[in-house]
Amino acid sequence: MDIAQRIIDEWMKKLPGFIKWEIHESGNGVFYDIVYWKDEASAKNAEKQMMNIPSAAEWYGCYKPETISGKKMKLLKEF
């Protein structure tokens, strides 16, 4: 989790439209990252900027490349 905090502090917080990043575990050792952006344009900009992340190699080392995927979700209702 230390590397995640560094990514937030060094890179993600500075990107336009960034709201928050959550890391969840399903209980069987599978982790899910959920990143919230103001809009789709902000999320797409972040994707383009991912190669500029300080400490990127250390961060990517936490993931198995074949398990990384992205999904776009639209908020329908917040209670």
Image: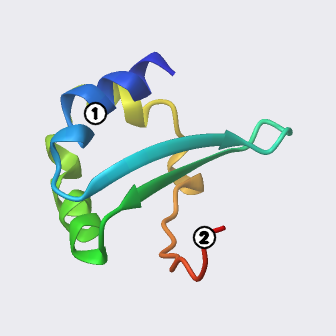
Judge whether 3 appears above or below 73 on screen: above
Task: Tell whether 55 sits left or right of 33.
Answer: left
Q: Residue 4 appears at what percent x and percent y? A: 42, 28
| Residue that numbered label 2 is attached to | 78
| Residue that numbered label 1 is attached to | 56
CA gap, disc 1 and disc 2:
33 Å
In primary-sequence order, the first of circles 1 and 2 is: 1
Which secondary structure lies at badge 2? Answer: loop
Number of callouts = 2
* Residue in front for this viewpoint, 5 or 65: 5
Mark on residue 15?
none
* Dot 2 amino acid type: Glu
Q: Residue 64 appears at what percent x and percent y? A: 56, 43
Give the quadrant of residue 67.
bottom right
Judge whether 29 appears above or below 20 on screen: above
At horizontal 30% and vertical 66% (from top left) the residue drawn is 38
At horizontal 51% and vertical 22% (from top left) the residue drawn is 1
Q: Residue 69 appears at what percent x and percent y? A: 52, 63
Q: Residue 25 appears at what percent x and percent y? A: 73, 40
Judge whether 75 appears above or below 21 on screen: below
Task: Tell whether 43 sits left or right of 20.
Answer: left
* Residue in front for this viewpoint, 52 or 79: 79
* Dot 1 amino acid type: Ala
